[in-house]
Amino acid sequence: MNEMSQLQPTLADLVGVSTGPMPASLYTDPNQYELERERIFRRAWLMVGREERIVEPGQFFVKDIAILSASIIITRAKDGQVRAFHNVCSHRGNHVVLEPEGKANRFACRYHGWTYKNTGELIGVPDESGFFDFDKKKCGLTPVACDIWDGWIFINFQPRPEVGLMEFLGSFGTEFADIPYPHADNCLILSGEINANWKCLADNFSEFYHIQSIHPKTLAPVYAGKDNPCSRPLDAGAYGAHRSVAGWLNIGYQPPANWKVVRWLYPANQTVTGTQKEGEVNPLAEHPMVNHPKRKDWSSDVNWIFPNWHIQISASRFWTHEFWPRNRSQSSWEARFYQPKATTVRERLQLEHFTATITDTFLEDLANIESTQKGMESGAKSFVYLHESEILIRHSLEQVDKWTRAKTMAEALD
Ligand code: FES
Ligand SMILES: [Fe+2]
């Protein structure tokens, strides 16, 4: 009997989720999408970026959130505080900031020149005396609730959020805090517009079950093997609305000896297995919630924070996926791979090799994501059947269903 088949009880028992088929309508029903807009995206705390993007006073970036037709400016002012505002001019509603990111202490709307401080106050109105009963103090940028957890910036679209960020994060927020994320100030960004419901997109990055089928050359040699051909995960956990799974590693894998160039391209700090060298202390892998089962045959964790983003962690790096709905059957995907800056030609080539490899795997994924959505749109299937390994998907669908039924946040988080 191999190690995987000894996993008892099942992951579903451990996490406390259901085991029956799940309704396919969650991915296709227009009413479901409307409920998700109002009861998930307008109520949940949504992660918009890492703090390292706006380290210096005046730095800002703009996040477009299509499902709420919103454009949000996230900026750090001189007082050090990070604030979020609707990117909407108080004059006649134009978008004030048109650049995706930058550095500015004030924002000027190009239409008629109204100007705002980066703390939101309106400070300049051309020919101000021509306006009637005009109170500039009431015409600042509209603030959006904003808070930070462990370097991750979140916003909330409720004018007065029913629950704070820490309450929303619950036990996930305490147990997964203080992870020493390496190279958090430098990342490679991959993004795309995908013809699939946001959950269908997120599901793909939430299970290892497909590795042997669609990634036979790219990922399967490392993440599947004769002891675990379908990449069953090592462990899983649920933390309120959030969830985590630990992936398996084919620890004995080495690239074939005649792949000399490939061997040379593996970064020194990232062995083929992605784990640290014998005897090396690695603060990232030491964190109690990184490689939670603390097994040698561990590849990476997928931490899925409700509703729409992942933090994935291996022994040498971390990366994120964001899944943003554009409409019922179209989504925006953004992956950020945090990595060291190259200091030698070899390191530069290693990073390029990594980029090329990871891009190949995503191309293998994306084609299947879009055709899955197409298949579900046909209405031929009323249910989807989820394997034990697809535990994150099941927990996600259960939470989506719970939130869309819940009239209050207290009910949703209960
Ligand atoms: S709409 Fe912004 S200044 Fe007129
Ligand atoms: Fe994949």
Image (cartoon, rainbow, N blue to C red):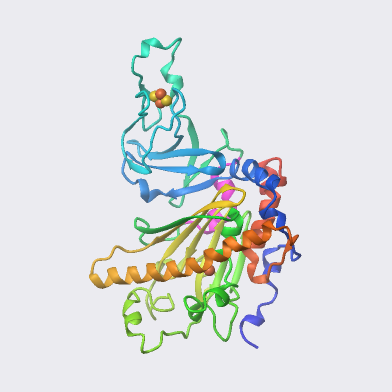
Q: Position of residue 174 (x, y in %)?
A: 53, 55
Q: Main secondary structure of the magenta part?
A: helix
- What residue is drawn where x is 35% and y is 80%? 262
Q: Is residue 35 left or right of residue 124?
A: right
Residue placed farthest to the left in the image? Answer: 344
Q: Position of residue 358 (x, y in %)?
A: 43, 68
Q: Nearer the viewer, residue 214 or 49?
A: 214
Q: Nearer the viewer, residue 306 or 126?
A: 126
Tell whether position 121 is magenta: no
Can see residue 114?
yes
Q: Nearer the viewer, residue 242 or 157?
A: 157
| 303 vs 167: above or below | below
> Which segment did they paint magenta?
163-177
Q: Is residue 77 left or right of residue 91?
A: left
- What residue is drawn where x is 44% and y is 49%? 49
Q: Quadrant of residue 345?
A: bottom left
Can see residue 243?
no
Q: Quadrant of residue 35?
A: top right
